[in-house]
Image (cartoon, coloured by chain):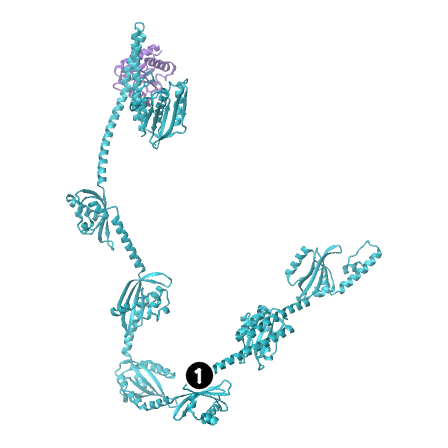
Amino acid sequence: LEEKIILLVEDNPNDVTLTERALKKSHILNRLVLAKDGAEALDYLFGTGNWAGRDLSNMPQLVLLDIKLPKIDGLEVLRRIRADSRTKLLPVVILTSSNEEKDLVNGYAMGANSYIRKPVNFNQFADAVRQLGLYWLVLNECPPCNVRHLDA
Amino acid sequence: MKDKARKSGIPIIRDIPWGIQEALKESDNNLKTIAETVPTGIGIVGISDGKFLYVNSAYEKAFGYAHDELIGQTTPDIYWDVEDQTKILNLLKKNKNIADYNVRLKKKDGTMFWGMSSIRPITYKGNPALLGILTDITERKKAENDVMRLDRELQAIRECDHAIVHANDEKALLSDVCRILCTTAGYRLAWVGAVKYNKAKSVKPLAWKGNKKYIAKAKITWADTERGQGPTGLAVRTSKTHFFQDFATESAAAPWRDEALLLGYRSSIAIPLIADSGSVFAVLSLYSSEVNSFNPAEVRLLEELARDLSFGISTLQERAKRQQAEAEVSHLATFPAMNPMQVIEIDISGTVQYCNESTKKLFPDLEKRGIKHPYLVGLLQIVRTHSLLKSKTFTRELEVAGKYHEQLIYIVGDGQHIRVYGHDISENHQAEALLRETSNYLNNLLDYANAPIIVWDTHFRISRFNPAFERLTGYKANDVMGAQLSLLFPPDRKEESLQQIHRTLAGERWEIVEIPILRVDGEVRIVLWNSANVYDSDGKTIIATIAQGQDITERKQAEEQLKISETQYRRLFEAAKDGILILDADTGQILDVNPFLTEMLGLAYKEFIGKHLWELGYFKDIIANKANFSELQAKKYIRYEDLPLRTSDGREMKVEFVSNLYAVDHRKIIQCNIRDITKRKQAEEKLQETTQYLNNLLDYANAPIIVWDPLFHITRFNHAFENLTGISAEEAVGKKLDMLFPQDSKVESMTHIHEAMSGERWEVVEIPILRRDGAVRIVLWNSATLLGIDGKKMVATIAQGQDITERKQAEENVKKLNEELKHRAAELEVANKELEAFSYSVSHDLRAPLRTMEGFSQALMEDCSDILNDECKDYLRRIQGSAELMAQLIDDMLQLSRLTRADMLFNEVNLSEIAQTILNDLKTIQPKRIVKFDIAPGMIARGDEKLLRVALHNLLENAWKFSSKVPEAHIEFGVTDHQGKKAYFIRDNGAGFDMTYIAKIFNPFQRLHTATEFPGTGIGLASVQRIIHRHGGKVWAEGKVGKGATFYFTLNE
């Protein structure tokens, strides 16, 4: 049975903690891989840097992507995900503080599957995370994991 | 029986007892007999087929048809006038029957007769038919006609008699009579012809009424010829009345028939007018349109009229004769006493009838000796010897007592009297004697005359040759005496010259001829010959010819020259495009005028010649004016530059009138040249007008205008320029242009001008001007070069200046401001960019800590609720609340900044609809509230829909919010007028506000109520203000605590 991994790209440790707490509260026990910036996220996805040699056949079931990130920002990460055949079908949900129109438009334009603004109120946040997990990890049928086989 | 009945046309009646039948038959027979014997025509015609069923013999006779030609046949053409048939049929239709209808009918042979017809419908043999009864009334009609005509005739004669009695003039009388006969008696033509006892035996029309042309064409004579066989000719010859009863049939009428019938003359009569002596002196001829027009009664009347007329005319003639004789006598009575002529009248017996004083003086014993007087005896003898019948007058000379008298003798009209007029011609006789005496003298004269004189005999041998002729020809008289005349002619002209002489001598007068003469030295001279034949004493036989020659060789040459020059002059005169008049300088009369002038004035050549200039009516007071005329004679030249003149067709023209006086052939003439200068004058006037207009334009133009000559001297300087410079035109004109420029820019400006002028166009240049008061004005010069008529040579430059000093300064200011503005805009842009970046960070980064604070507070609450006391929990809640408020503030702030930055899209926006939607939404959120809305319908504004929606949302939400504590909330959205602009307003009856704080109400985050009273961040109205300002509008508010608030806004509509 394949493990359904969630890749959380978030630089703020407080937010990471709160996100983990919210997932836990919602009984989403999937493995959570954390990338603290855009570069780390790309390393994980493409098996480079610290993640070199990772089995790339196991791709995350969901990517939770913040926009404002050190090194490489979220939108650039998204662009690269969509540009690469190995990752272009990954469900990516933008999870950010910003509700700037610009970010929304760019996010969707880059191929985000969903855009969620983090509410300040934790209960609301927790609820959002719960619904998110439920939808993307349970309800939603993901595209076939190993897309390379198809390409080949 | 049956057949017979049918033939007789009597119906057979059956089924009747025999006895009655017999009786009927008898009655029928009786009827038939009556019908056949009465003189009245009876005819029956079937209505269905129009065929004759029965006619009696009177009927047949009336029309001249046989029985079988009518019975069973359709009605033949029996009406003279077809229209009568129609009339009768119409009458029948209308009245069913006709009684005693007078109608002209036509016989079989085509002749006309009058019938009286009665027609009624009957049943004949059981069929509908018409019974016609006809009586021939021709005779009666004719009698009626005759009576009527006689009546007219009588009336005419009465009128004629009246005319005769009152007549003064023969011709007028005759005309009257002719007129009366035509108008009253109804003749077509009446004329009176005088009988001429001449060779042609003509009849000359004296008066007429009617077609005169016919009289002329008729060429009537009273000679016994073809055209003398008419009534007129016969009347003259027989002294009796004659007539044509019908032009159409009488053979003697043949020469006039066609013409007469054409004019509708059917008969004519001629009645002779007979003088007391019994001779026919005239004929009265009348023409009638009817045949057989003249019955004996009428003729009698006309003859009576003719007698009266003859009498009238002879009376008139007598009267005229008497008057003439009286006039003659009275004339003669005054004649003799004062006349030195001898007048004597004797009868053929020699008795003196009349003798005037002169005659008595000449023959003192004439009365005493009576017819024995030798003068009278001689006179009678002379008269007798001359066949006086042939010539009634002749003259003779008579010597009485040594005096010669010329006498005119003539036979007075009746041949019974001889009248003599004589006068004394003794002086003439003396003159003749004198002449003879001078004959010798003349001979001498001939010889010594200056004029060359030659005489030749009938054989053209020279018989006299005077010394002057010797000089002319170079021959000596002795050399040429007896020689042929032709000796004197050049060989090639001999024949021609002799023929010319022959020809002229054969005529009664020898005309002056030009014959060249060959001098003995071979030179040819042109000689004008003036000659006369010399006759023998009988006055008939030519014995010689005398000729006087005139050497015209030089004159001839001069003439040739003159002719050439005349021709040239004439051509010039005829073709001149000026009017030329030649006047006699002494009389002022017009001698000649050229075609151009006749055309110009619209008068014919004839109308000029011989007239005075002022008589033409065009040039009054020109040469007529004595002062002018003497001025012309003194100066020999006069010129009028501008002379108004009116042509015959009424055109006004202006002419230049130049007169010259000079002599031609010792005769002084005036030549007037008249030139139409209307166009030139008009052009000049136009030019003057234009110049005036331009001057005014120039002087009073608002723009400063200056003109300078090619040497840069100022020639014009208008008022506006004076104002611009403070220098007067007097000061400026004539000065160099550079006087206007400030010292430091003089050279530069002049260079500028030089450069600009050398180009084709002078472009607009900016040149500073130094005012008199020392101020410098910047002037924009716009100039043009004025070229001479040749279009090449520059004559001046005109420049218009425009003082742009203020504009310049303003431009400078604007430029400066623009730069500043640009700078500011750049700064603003940077600031905006920074703000944007800031906002972005704020939205991102400011929220994260808040989330942390809130999230972990919540975590504490959840994880440690059992160890935290209530106070701690309250603190945690406060942290959470603040964090959330902070998040809200951040969002509002971002929204506000977004409103400032967002791009605007202007469209028609329906505010009413938007407001309705917003209020509906609010109602959905708080469905329990009872709020009354009043939204004015159809409020359509122009603006950015998204922004306006936000603004309305904020305002309506405020109204909703602040009226939440009122039991009957009322929200109103409408539009009103504010300083001529649409002002939208939103009014509520809620909490209102204190006007003290009105200044702060639109500041961001400004609140007038506590959050517990009414929640909010205080960003709403700030947003509204931003949006309205971005639309170029204004927003303001009115309110009172507890009494609600009203928010107004305008949009830049």
Name which residue type carries label 1: Thr
At which x and y percent is residue B289?
60, 68
Can you tell which chain is drawn purple? A
Near-viewer residue (B970 or B112):
B970
Residue B417 shows up from this direction: yes
Q: Is residue A111 above or below residue B68?
A: above
Image quarter for residue B509?
Answer: bottom left
Task: For the N terminus of chain A, give its image quadrant.
Answer: top left
At which x and y percent is residue A90?
34, 18
**Residue highlighted by disc 1:** B334
At which x and y percent is residue B296?
65, 74
Chain to which mark 1 belongs: B
Near-viewer residue (B576 or A110):
B576
Q: Which residue sits at x=22%, y=41%?
A: B804
The residue lying furthest to the right in this view is B19
Q: Is residue B937 left or right of residue A59?
A: right
Q: Is residue B771 above or below residue B251?
A: above
Near-viewer residue (B183 or B84):
B183
Element type where label 1 sits in the image:
helix
Image quarter for residue B207?
Answer: bottom right
| Number of residues whose C-alpha sits closer than 10 Å to that of mark 1, classed few (under 14), some (14–19) or many (20 or more) | few
At which x and y percent is residue B799?
23, 48
Q: Is residue B155 left or right of residue B589?
A: right
Near-viewer residue (A105 or B620):
B620
Residue A103 shows up from this direction: no
Can you tell which chain is drawn cyan? B
Q: Which residue sits at x=30%, y=90%?
A: B441
Task: For the C terminus of chain A, give its image quadrant.
Answer: top left
Image quarter for residue B780?
Answer: top left
